[in-house]
Image (tube, rainbow, N blue to C red):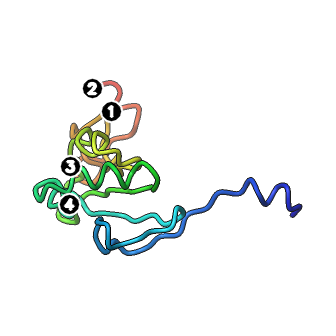
Amino acid sequence: MSMSLLSLLVYTVGVKCRGINKKEHYAPEHMFSLSENTANKMFKRNGMIDLVKHNRTHLVRVYPKGTRVWSTNFVPQQYWSAGIQLVALNWQTYGGFGSRTALSDPLTIDQTWAT
């Protein structure tokens, strides 16, 4: 690969979140994932401002908590409002948010659109 092409390459490195404060330093390519619960705890502890400041220069991903076994979703707006760029949602349902799950009602796509 040519050096000019290589200079255009953008990459991230997944790192463990050790907290967002002035003591912790993350390189620009460092990205971490937060569970829904961890992000909500940050909001409650007045960490929202620190999170917004962090998200100005770094990528952060939030994913649904592991107990959402019925493919339910959280409301992504609060995370986007905090500047979180990647909000992972469960898309294992037909017809939008929570109408039918693929596990409990195995219809074909044609049958689903007809209902």
Q: In the rendered structure, which disc, 3 or 1, sits on the residue that comes first in sequence? A: 3
Q: Residues within 10 Å of mark 2 (few under 14, many from 20)?
A: few
72 and 14: which is toward the camera = 14
Residue bearing the label numbered 4: 69
Q: In the rendered structure, which disc, 1 or 4, sits on the residue that comes first in sequence? A: 4
Measuring 32% from the left and 56% from the top, which residue is drawn there? 62
Residue bearing the label numbered 3: 72
**Residue furthest toward the left?**
44
Answer yes or no: do the residues labelled 1 and 4 have beta carbons within 8 Å? no
Measuring 77% from the left and 57% from the top, which residue is drawn there? 7
Considering the image in quadrants, where does the C terminus appear? top left
Q: Which mark is residue 112?
A: 1
Considering the image in quadrants, where does the N terminus appear? bottom right
Q: CA distance from mark 2 to mark 1?
A: 6 Å
Q: Is residue 29 left or right of residue 56?
A: right
105 and 87: which is toward the camera = 87
Q: In the rendered structure, which disc, 4 or 2, sits on the residue that comes first in sequence? A: 4
Give the structural element (helix, strand or loop) at label 2: loop
Residue bearing the label numbered 2: 115
Find residue 77 and report its image quarter.
top left
How many circles with numbers are drawn on the protein? Answer: 4
66 and 17: which is toward the camera = 17
